[in-house]
Image: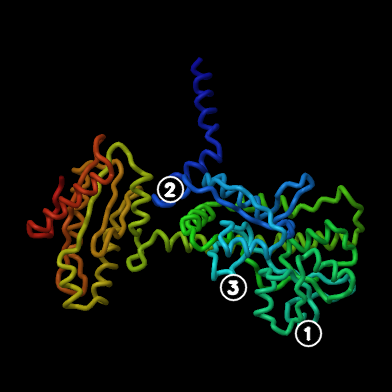
Amino acid sequence: MLKISILFIFLSVISFSSDDFKKFEEETFIILSQKEKNFLKNTKIKAITSTTWAPMNMLNDDSELSGIAVDFWKLIKKHSNLKSKYVVAENWNTVLYKIKNREADITLGTSYGKDKSQYAKFSVPYISFPIAFATLLDKHFIPDASFLDNKKVAVGANYSTYTVLNEAYPKINFVQVKNTKEALELLSAGEVYAAVDILPVIAHLISKNGYYNLKVAGTSKHTIDISFMVRDDYPELLSILNKYIQMLTQDEKNLIVREWLTVKFDKRLVDYTTLIQILVAILIMAAFLIFRQLELRKYNKKLQKLSTTDELTGIYNRRKLNQILNANLVNAYSIILVDIDHFKFINDVNSHFVGDRVLRDFSKILLKNMKTNQYVGRWAGEEFLIFLPNTSIIEAKSIAENLRIQIESNEFDIDMVTASFGISQSNLKTSVNDVLTQADNALSRAKKSGRNQVICI
């Protein structure tokens, strides 16, 4: 019977799925403002998209809206509980017109453009792809877009690909058409030298439409960052999207991209030459995605550090401290507020440069004395907060007294620096705001009583 009970408990723990953990993680770390919460509750989003940019947005065999951009939108909706409805536009120009005139709220896949930014805002990118060049089979490899100078190149009108390449390579003779499908038709008929769009679009359309005389001849060093474009009077929607995009895992992104890069040949015979070309395109895409994932991982780590670290001192900032306070509440914890004594005098007499050096050295002393699961950060100006889980007020006082002595005896290259400490401990009836208020009151008493001392409440 005991074994059965243990097994039941084990299975219950295992049943806390990755989706449950994801939800818990989002609820813990995605902090929405009251305006954002009200927006989610009261607003139904009108999403608009064309269906002429396969596989980004398209109609599947059942005439349902689908594609890479659509799948990312569905994923963001799932995590954020956004309410929305779809509007399918005849073409991309109609999408832009509807957003510009606020007849629609968001489009699902595009990239930043100066002209579009006059009436819309862009989310952080959720995926990026390289620009690819399609040519006839007998043409040479194209290592860079400059090889297309003075040649006729078909591209979708007002597409991001055109905006990027036209600005970087003004000598290319662009032929703007309705969409990439039409661009490939012109290329297949020999009326233009090349057609351009992002790699998954080019590879998908060559495969699906059986262009056996075409190939992917290379990719540009330029990439297209794919974002959501939002009407410019919906700042709450934009900030909500950005928060949830940044919480997407790499596995979630890879799953969507892999599904749409899988080429299906069940409806047509494909010769080996075309098959090899498509496989090469997929390999290029896979290599690019791996590179981008590594770069994005570095970038995300840097962003994470910037968003949680005080720039001057290198310790946690107030935003990170708030996250820690709300995510690590236990039955018993203590909070210490620390204030550098007479810091304004230090700045006024010795200069702000010296004051900054004092703040950095002061932070190092605090950080050096923190043990595992103890947290310190800059709370405001010359004020610091120390969060001590599972720590009584007596233990916290001992920690604070030790810090006070170390600070007093440390050489700061100026006259002696001291600090005042206010401490408070939680109980079952106090909220974190109550504990913070009590610690702040204790700190005020320490300063009014002569400074350079520890006061507990």
The residue to which callout 2 is attached is 38
Q: Residues within 10 Å of mark 1 (few under 14, many from 20)?
A: few
**Which label lies toward us, 1 or 2?**
2
Relative horizontal placement of residue 432, taking residue 180 as reference (left or right): left
Q: Quadrant of residue 446?
A: bottom left
Q: Which mark is residue 212?
A: none
Marks 1 and 2, the one that precedes in the sequence: 2
- Badges 1 and 3: C-beta atoms under 8 Å apart? no
Relative horizontal placement of residue 452, taking residue 210 as reference (left or right): left
The amino acid beneath tag 3 is: Asp
- Using the image as rendered, state which of residue 373 and residue 114 is in the foreground: 114
- Badges 3 and 2: C-beta atoms under 8 Å apart? no
Percent position (x, y) of residue 179?
76, 65
The amino acid beneath tag 1 is: Asn
- Where disc 2 sits, the SS reads helix
**How far apart are the alpha carbons under marks 3 and 2?**
31 Å
The residue to which callout 3 is attached is 115
- Where disc 3 sits, the SS reads loop
Q: Decide: is 427 above or below 440.
A: above
The amino acid beneath tag 2 is: Asn
The residue to which callout 1 is attached is 150
